[in-house]
Amino acid sequence: MTQTLNKTNTTETNAKLRSLNDWQKSIQRYLDPPGNLNPTVGLFIGGYCLAALTIWQWYQGSWPLPVLVGLAFISLHMEGTVIHDACHNAAHPNRWINQAMGHGAAILLGFSFPVFTRVHLQHHSHVNDPKNDPDHIVSTFGPVWLIAPRFFYHEYFFFERKLWRKYELLQWGLERSLFIVIVIAGLKFDFMNVIYNLWFGPALMVGVTLGIFFDYLPHRPFLSRNRWKNARVYPSRLMNILIMGQNYHLVHHLWPSIPWFEYKPAYEATKPLLDSKGSPQRMGIFETRSDSLNFLYDIVLGVRSHKKRRSKMRKLATLLPNLRWRKRWISLLHKTAVTPHSIKND
């Protein structure tokens, strides 16, 4: 009987080992570079065409302002996926075209491609590490509705860590100079109203969208650094279209070279593996009372300490008027603290 059980266990173990070795073969077709004409190229060209259409309609057409703002938002939202895939060399198989698409998307978004690339790759290397993951600060240092301005921290992180390589500092200077020239030209030639309405405003809206769906939702509750659990999946056909696959964000973290339009099929092909690893595959907002309260807290205040007992934000208690309020503040810090598990403990 014991021998039979041992043989059964050995067979099951060998089957699992064989299946794990086979996953790479199963996922390989999604890891291959995309074709020359792929959906990301369509997003890049389509984004610029929509941007041109909104400007033309501003001067020559009769479309109402909300429609133009909506089109500008869609244009920039499309380019957000382009710059993201380009920084992983997944936008186009040709290296130079991939780079051109990344820089082109960055210019339209008001970003800097070298900053986005280097900072985003740091995020992948240190997911949910409070000290070394730049997106962790973006997601946990203020209310969700103010997440867009916190993206400026990326620029600080880029220079503070000296992340640039080769000609990237020059590229940053050129892109930032172009941005300044456009703004100065807008002031001099009186088209700042176009910049405010069709660029800055939609860019702020896109910043909130990217912050929520690229940073906040995929990584909450920001506690795990294990590669199988440091991000999540929340399957949805509608969300897959609206946010271009970012609801399958864990798939992207596991295999960053997969282009956005392959996330869904790659997830479906590897779901049994994710199940066996205990990977989170739900949005995780309203499943428990704790989830709901934490989400509400992030909307209203969202400032989270990374140390329960030695939080730097404890000092703010001295500004409160009485002892009762100070105790409440310290209690809130304890309850909302985010202390990610080490990779070994996951």
Image (cartoon, helix red, strand yellow):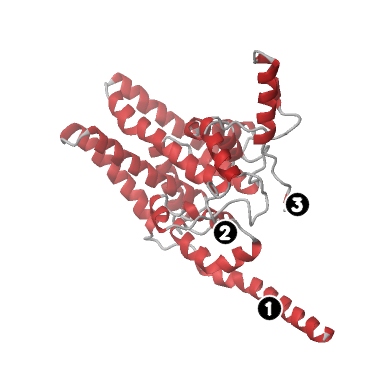
Secondary structure state at the residue bearing disc 2: loop
Visible residue check, residue 220: no
User: Residue at the location (70% across, 23% down)?
Assistant: 327
Give the spatial CA distance, label 2 vs label 1. 23 Å
* First-in-chain label (2 vs 3): 2
Identify the disc placed on residue 255.
Answer: 2
In front of the other: 11 or 70: 11
In primary-sequence order, the first of circles 1 and 3 is 1
Q: Residue furthest right?
A: 2
Q: Is residue 142 above or below residue 269?
A: above
Position of the N terminus by quadrant: bottom right
Q: Nearer the viewer, residue 328 or 133?
A: 328
Label 1 amino acid? Ala
Q: Amino acid at mark 2?
A: Trp
In the image, residue 249 lies at what x, y percent? 53, 53
Q: Determine the secondary structure under disc 3.
A: helix
- The Cα–Cα distance between marks 1 and 3, rounded to whole angstroms, is 26 Å
- Residue ranking furthest to the top: 321
Q: Is residue 253 above or below residue 325?
A: below
Mark on residue 15?
1
The foreground one among 331 and 188 is: 331
Q: Is residue 270 above or below residue 232?
A: below
Relative side of 57 to 197, left or right: left
Residue under numbered circle 3: 345
Instruction: Answer yes or no: is residue 311 visible.
Output: yes
Side of 75 where 211 appears, left or right: right
Towards the viewer: 260 or 283: 283
